[in-house]
Structures are given as C-alpha cells and as structure tokens.
Image: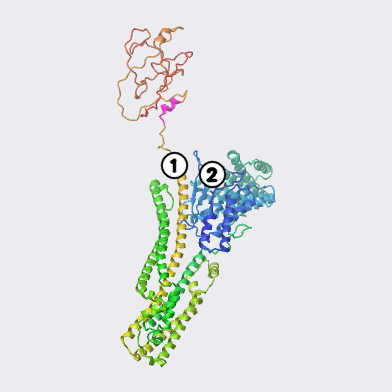
Amino acid sequence: MMATTFVSVPFKKASEVDMAKPLSKFIQATYPSGDTQAEYVRAAEELNSLRKNALGRPLDKHDSSLEILLRYYDQLCSIEPKFPFSENQLCLTFTWKDAFDKGSLFGGSVKLALASLGYEKSCVLFNVGALASQIAAEQNLENDEGLKAAAKYYQLASGVFQHIKDTVLSALNREPTMDICPDTVGTLSLIMLAQAQEVFFLKAAADKMKDAIIAKLANQAADYYGDAFKQCQYKENLPKYFYFQEVLPVLAAKHCMMQANAEYHQSVLAKQQKKFGEEIGRLQHASDSVKTVASRYDEYINVKDLSDKIARALTAAKKDNDFIYHDRVPDVKDLEPVGKATLVKSTPVSHPMSQKYTDLFAKMVPLAVQQSLSIYNQRRADLVNRLIGQMRESTNLANGVLASLNLPAAIEDVSGDSIPQSILEKSKVVAQKGGLQTIDQFMRDLPELLQRNREILDEALKILDQEEVSDHELKAKFKERWKRTPSSELYKPLRAEGANFRTTLDRAVQADQVVRERYAAHREVIALLCKPEAELNAAIPSGNPTKSLQGSEVIMLLKTLLASLNEVKKERETFENDIKSVQFDMSSRFLTALAQDGAISEEAISVTELDRLYGGHTESVQQNLKKQEELLAKIQAAHEEFSKSTQSNTDANQREEMLKKLAAGHDQFVELVANLNEGTKFYNGFTEILLKFQTKCSDIVFARKTERDELLKDLQQSIAREPSAPNIPAAPAYQIAASVGGTTPAVPTPAPRSVFQPKPQPPARPPPPSVGATFPAAALAADPAPAPSASMPASVGGVGMLSQAQGPPYPSYQGYPGFYPMPMPMAYNQYAYGQYNMPYMYHPPGQPPFQTAQPPQQPQQPQQPRYPYPQQQFYQQ
C-alpha cells in the first residue's frame, strides 16, 4: 500500500463475470452459421479467459502483469463499437469494489454493479494506474535505469487517472464509487505527477547537473506536492485513505523537503555569485523546512542526511560571513523566488496501449456499420419487393384481362364441343400442384403456425411483465434505496418491438382472411379443373361457333398479340431473377465512410448505391410494363372486332362464360398457392425472429435478476450496519462518576429554573464521636455506620463519604445534602443523637458542618449494592 516515501495506489477488486455466454448468444443470433460465426465465438471465449487472467488473480508488480491489463483494456476498446452493450440489449453486469473502502465491523465493502462497458473500462484503467504506481514504487532509485523506469510509470499512472477523471461521468449513468470519482482520480493524478517530478530531481542530482536546474526541478516538485496536499485537505469528499493511510502527512513532508532542497541548491548558486547574505538566508529557510519535517513527519520521511548537509553548509556560511564578508542576511520574504522547471507530463491514454495487442474481433464490423447495413438491407428489400410486386401485379392484370376476353380459348374453340388446348394445359397445371388438397393443407397449417407465434410473443412479454412487477414491489419497499433503472423505463424499446410484432401478426391474420374468402369464391371452379378430361369436357356447355373466321386476319392478329404478351410475361420472370441475384458488400463502403468522416451518412450512401445497382433494372421493368399496356390495348381492340364477326347465340355465350371461369379459376389457384406458400414461409421465418426476441427478453430478465440479487445483498449488509435506534443520549454526570471507582463526583448545582423550596431538613446523624481509644462494640452492632454513597461528596479527609438515603432524586443544595427520612422512635441510647440534641463539636476549617473526619485506620464500610435495573433519567441538578 505504501512505500517508504512514495505513494502507491491499491487495486480495485472485480467480481467474476462470464462474458463468453452472452457474447456468443449475440454472435449466433446476428451472424449466419459458418466459419465466421465459429471464429467470433472462439474470440469471445478467449476474451473471457483474458479477463480472468487480468482480474481474477493477484498481479505481480512487473511489466508482464501490466501488459495483461493493457491487453484486456485494448480488447474492451475494440469490442465497444461492435457489440450493443446496454441494459436492454446485450446486458452484461460488471461489479467492482471500492479500492479504498476496507469494509466495516460487520464485513462487506462499498461496491457498484452496472451494465456498462464504460464502467468496466474505467475500473480496468484504474487498476492500470494502480499497478503502474506500485511498479514505480518498487524501482531501485540508486541507479539510472531505476530512476528512468520510476519516472515513466509515475507519468503513465498520472495520465491514466487523468483520463478517468475526464471520461468517468460520461461512461456511467449514475454516481461512481468514491475511488473513481473525478475529485479522487484528479488528486491521484497530481500525486503521481509530483512523484515523477521528484524522480527527475533525484536523477538530476545524481547526474550532478547545475545547481540552478536542480533547484528549479525541486521547486516544481514542491509546488506539485503542495497542490496535492491542498486538494486532500480541502476536499471533504475524498476517501479516508488520503487522511488515514499516511498519504496526507507524506505530501506535507515532501512539500517541505522539496522546498528545502530547492533553497539549498539555490544557496549554492548564490555562493557562486558571491551573494553570501542570500546564501545564509536560503540555508536558514531550508533548515526551518527540514526541522518541520523532522519534528512532525519523522516517521514518514527521513531527512537526517539532508538536515546535516544543510546544517554544515549553514555553519560554514555564517562563519565565513561573520569573519570575512559581513554581508547583510536578507529576510526570507525578501528572497527572490526560486524558478521552476517541469520535465514531466501525464502520459496520454490512446488505443491501443499494449505493445502486443491483436484485435480478437478484427473481422467484425463496428456496431454503427452493422446498423447502417441493417437499414440499407431494409431499403434494398423495399426496392426489390416494389419492383417484383409491380411485375407480378402486371402479370395478374394481363391474366385477368385475357380471362375476361376468353382468350386464347375463344380463338382455339373450333369444334364447339371439345376442350380448348389452353384450358387443358391449365387443368394439368392445377392437377400437378395438388389441386384442392394442397390449398386445404395450407389452410390447416396456417392457424397452427399463427398460434405458435402468438404463444412465443406472449411468453416473451410475460417474462418482462413478471420481472417488472417484482421490480415495482422492491421499489415500493425500499424506496430511494432501490437505486437502479426502473424496469418500466428499461423495457420500453422491447415493448415497442413486441407491439410491432403483434401488429405484424394482426396484419397477417387479415391477409389470411382475404385468402380464405378468395378460395371460397373459386373453390368450385378449381375443383372442376382437377377432374379428368372427360368430366371436364362434360361440364363445359357445347356451342356452335362460326368456323368461317378460322384463318382470318383478326384471329391471326390476336394470336400474334397473345404470343407477344407471353414474351413480355416471360421477360418479367427473367427480370425478377436478375433483380434477386444482385449482390454487393456495403460493409466496406460504410467502413470507409466511418474511417474518413468518423460517422456514417447512411441515407445518402444507400440511396446512391441502390440507384447505381438497381437503376438499370428499374428502367427495364418500366419499359416492360409500358409494352404490356400497349399490347393489352391492341388485344382488347382486336377482340372487339372478333366478337362482332362471330354469330352470337345462347349456347355459345354459356360455353364462353364457362371457359372464362375455368381460365380465371386456374389463375386464382396459382395465385392462392403462391400466397399460401409465402404465408407459410412468413410464419416460419417470423417464428425464428420471435424466438430471438424471446431469448433477448430472457437474457435481460436474467441479468436484471442477477443485478437484483446483488442489490439485495448490498442492502442487507448496509441495513445490518445501520444502528437500530437513534443515538443514545449521554449519561448524567453523576452516573458516570458513580460507575468509575475512586472518582469523586462534582457537587451538583441548582438547575436554572424556578424550584419550589421545601422546608429545610436537619442534617443526618453523624457517626458516634471517638472518645478515647475504646469504642463500644455494642453500639457498633446496634447502629452500624451507613455505607458511603457515590452520589455524595467525599469527606474532607478523603477517607469516607456520607451516605445518601434511598428515595426520589430531590434537588440538593450546599448545606442541605438531600432528603432524609425522619428518625423513628427508639429507646434511649447515649450515642443515638436526635435532630436537636447533638452536642456542639468543633469543625475544622474547610469541613462542612455536621461532618466528622473518620479515623484513617478505620476501614471503609462496604458499599450498598445498587438497584439492578437501569436508573431512570431525570433533570441533572
């Protein structure tokens, strides 16, 4: 804890934390399975081992131990931007004890648990400064290497403590413990800087540099020590360590000692300049300073050698001046101030600090890049879905138009009693895809998937509700003692996320209902398409179409237009595959922006890149849609001409309507299967998302329960240390006097209030007078002397004390010792004096009346036993 003359800082102690498990969970939930995920999981386990080596065992005062601490600190700096460390995301609670608190009579010590990586960094950095101060204090200052090493480590410790002072409040969301609060670490930084300056003074003196330089170095060290002493003295919120662990006296002694060294070396310079009076004045000032150290702080700082050196120089200087120079010796206040020279500065903290640092998560992108990638992927998905949705909507529109026009079945139906080829192909497609059985299976599966998702979401929110109720009850019980973020505030992001999930499920239910209604409307037609060809043909009414139009220009035009429309639809399928296959790694783009600007303008970068990647596809899709619109207009015009040319009759119209329904039924079947397939994929994918959400809720609740247990344990210890009743008032003076053997109580004085004056009572009967050398034994047996009472003043001779009769504590005054009962009637006894028949006796000067000095040889009577229960308190007289 303390070297002979240098201050070193004790370590903070950390509780064990399993970092591997929560980090691995986050990695597995965020990154896809594969080599990259496995590599990150191994890195998390290695980080956990590094923490155990750095904080889970005692560290030697050596460079290798400092290197372990620095490596762990560097790893914390590297993972901070890559993982979402917070109470409501990746919750890791770190518990540290105050370095300067040694606990109480009941055990335990001040500690703080926070789910903050910044808190962990600050505490680790504190131990870096503490270890650096301990290594510096162990150096051998008799050689040059030891001096250089000590100066380096003290400056490192000063920079570390200064960095904590500047960053600790922003890294924590609540008040830190006393050891890492800004005032404490600021004072420690100044102490380390003063010690580094002293080491440079020692090196300059060892190197026999010029006295002017040595004096300035010493004076600057004295100035640093003086500032540190003032901070310790005037800041009441510093730890008791500064006052009771030898720090304050060491700082005061070092301040005086450095002043003495500065004046001594400045006196040598004055002698060289033949300023002999100034030399003597400075030596006298130096002598006074070392005398102060020797008289007040001799147990901390040994200044005998310095004192002897100054004394010899002062004696020689006075002798020379008295016999030779006769120079006037100036007063201390008239001496020119000694200059100052600073050769030390706090070593700044920069990442990385370790010389052997390698980033365990070098391939993992920072969290800002991850968030930008997530938003970019959402933008990309919206763009791709919009383009694909436009193309699919156009295909459905074209199919609907053709179905309403009974195309191509109308131009294929020549005989009027056979199934058109297009209808046969549509029937085969429906039968190959399972027909009604496929749709019915989907319809049975969807409610089960929906119910599973709802149960997962309800269970996740139930976990939050239960913990929130527990936190609310503890807050109501302990009130201001329960110092942690309320669960109701902490869970707001999670509850908002859960509300979004529930809204998404509600929308999915609405979509399912639309699909059911469409299925019910087209079920009969789809069932008809599933039947064999003969049954299907029988279900279609026969007609008598005009055969004369076969091979006409209008039919040829319709066939050409329909073929072009099919080409347009096939082209869209190619476009959809091309759009889905576009890939580009935006992480490098975001990393470059983060490195150059220190921040990521996600929207500007994403919009630019999406336009570059999908601009051509968007233009091609729009041209395709425009081309389809033109073809549909031409098809509708040609069909109108075709309809005018055909002979209209009832049978033909019924047949055409049935063919239209069959074509529409095929299109609806294909669309329903696609929708139900997408719905199934949605529910299955949403299940994974909800399971991750449930895991997140479980993890944060587990962390909150761990934090709750720690807080409850601390509260139990603090409550046990608290007094169970208010401060007990001080006992009256007469009780204190009575409890100390041989102590003579002071004569009570009247209370400063109006007191009813009772009728004066005569004094108590004194002991029998001593007549001659004999004393009747019978008299002693008949009326033994009362035992002395501690509440009465002692006799003049100091041998015995007058007895105090038992009774209420009435006031007593000078001359009236107190209340005594009236004597009871008794037979005549020559020694039993009454109240008024006491013979006149001589009273020695200074002895109160009615008291007789007892013979010195007579032993003191035993004291009456006191009442066993505590005496009642009353007004002191």
Q: Residue at x 52, y 49 (%)?
A: 96
Residue 101 shows in this picture: yes
Percent x, y of residue 406: 38, 83
| Boundaries of the magenta span | 731-739
Residue 349 shows in this picture: no
**From the viewer's perspective, is the residue at label 2 or at label 1 nearer?**
1
Q: Which residue is mark 2?
A: 241
Contact (Cβ within 8 Å) of mark 2 with mark 1: no
Circle 1 SS class: helix
Question: What amino acid is found at the position of numbered circle 1 in the picture?
Answer: Ile
Question: What amino acid is found at the position of numbered circle 2 in the picture?
Answer: Tyr
Q: Which residue is mark 1?
A: 719
Specify the principal SS of the magenta part: helix
Q: Tell whether position 397 is magenta.
A: no
Front in this rendered view, residue 718 or 228: 718
Circle 2 SS class: helix
Percent x, y of residue 249: 56, 42
